[in-house]
Amino acid sequence: MSWLVSLLVLSGLIFFHELGHYFAARLMGVHVEVFSIGFGKKLYSFKAWSTQWSISAIPLGGYVQMKGQSDSDPSAISYDKDSYNVKTPAQRIFILLAGPAANFVLAFLLYFAIALGGPNILSPVIGQVVKDSPAFVAGLETNDTIRSINGVDIKTWEEMAKIISTSEGSLNVEIQRAGFIEFKTLTPKFSESTNMYGETIQKKMIGIGAAGVTHELKLEFGETLTYATNKTIWASTMIFTSVEKLLSGDVAAKELGGVISIVKLTSDATDAGWMSVLFFAALISVNLGVLNLLPIPALDGGHIMFNLYEMITKRAPSEAVLIKLTIVGWVMLFGLMGLGLFNDINRLMG
């Protein structure tokens, strides 16, 4: 059942992305011929609002086919007034940006729903204390709860870690231990750590690990908007940075995941509860938005690149160039998908 939920989540995210393109195209007066979720053989289709709506056999993506625009045949051009080709480069870029933008909007809405539901968040309760660390020397112990640092109230482990990593000088720490309040003074020191990208970094720490205790984060309405905004920005920054590090070689290509990883992780999130599903769906939505902005000819980013070229030079790329670049784009895209699938299989096989 969890695998079915995974496929429904992925299909829903793709649907929302393509819906962004669809509404933007209609707004610009462009006729949308086909709206498809999935590729290959059509399993179900119907016609409404002059568009053929389809569900296809291979649920690895989707597409909106506009009049006069086809990735499989760049020479299929139409000059009718409701064609994609007759629109200005700015109008075409608006249509192209609408898909990724829809994914960012959806991520915001999902994070907002999470905020309304009261997400569980890691409490500032100490688990492990590293021997001879600043925390050990100061007398911090397992199960101590950090209540404040330098007079700043601490509600989450994340807040505490941020204050420690950006601190200057010594810290006055208020802790709760067995129902009593105690005060400790310590000075963080730089230690070797590993970030989310697997890179070794130097970071100010005091030598403690989380106990794994969580609590429900209760937010006012205004705080839910701030939470959703901050999480959307955090996810976008993380995905952009991941792509940058992957392209620069700072992150190994073996870390790239494919659709199997997405389905498996979503399936695991399903087992953990609906809140986890929403959180992971928001992350995948941002991921779809970012990846579609890459300047690969088969993706939205590639088409945006062509239109920017036309805006700057006042002439469109030649048909021969478009065909060659589109072929290169598909090769790159299938290459990335193949690499992700290869890595997924390797992970499954250990």
Image (spheres, helix red, strand yellow):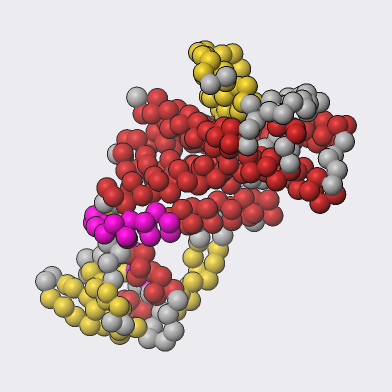
Q: How many marks?
A: 0
Which residue, as the protein is rendered here, is positioned at the far front?
81
Q: Is residue 208 above or below residue 29?
A: below
For the N terminus, the image quarter is top left
Q: Is residue 317 visible?
A: yes
Which residue, as the protein is rendered here, is positioned at the far left?
179
Give the left or right position of residue 64, taking residue 280 as reference.
Answer: right
Find residue 152 and report its horizontal and vertical position in percent: 30, 78
Of 29 and 1, the residue lying toward us: 29
Q: Quadrant of residue 89?
A: top right
Q: Identify the residue shown where x is 43% and y is 49%.
A: 108
Q: Is residue 71 visible?
A: no
Q: Is residue 218 above or below residue 205?
A: above
Q: Identify the residue shown where x is 39% and y is 44%.
A: 110
Find residue 287 and report its horizontal and vertical position in percent: 54, 44
Find residue 282 and report its horizontal and vertical position in percent: 44, 44
Residue 116 among those drawn in magenta: no
Highlighted magenta segment, given as a residue range: 207-230
Of 268 and 108, the residue lying toward us: 108
Q: Is residue 81 above or below residue 192?
A: above
Q: Quadrant of residue 29?
A: top right
Give the left or right position of residue 251, taking residue 214 as reference.
Answer: right
Residue 225 among those drawn in magenta: yes
Find residue 17 and report its horizontal and vertical position in percent: 53, 36
Q: Identify the residue shown where x is 81% and y is 26%.
A: 75
Q: Identify the residue shown where x is 88% and y is 32%.
A: 320
Give the left or right position of residue 220, taking residue 165 as reference.
Answer: left
Q: Is residue 86 above or below residue 32?
A: below
Of 285 and 6, the residue lying toward us: 285
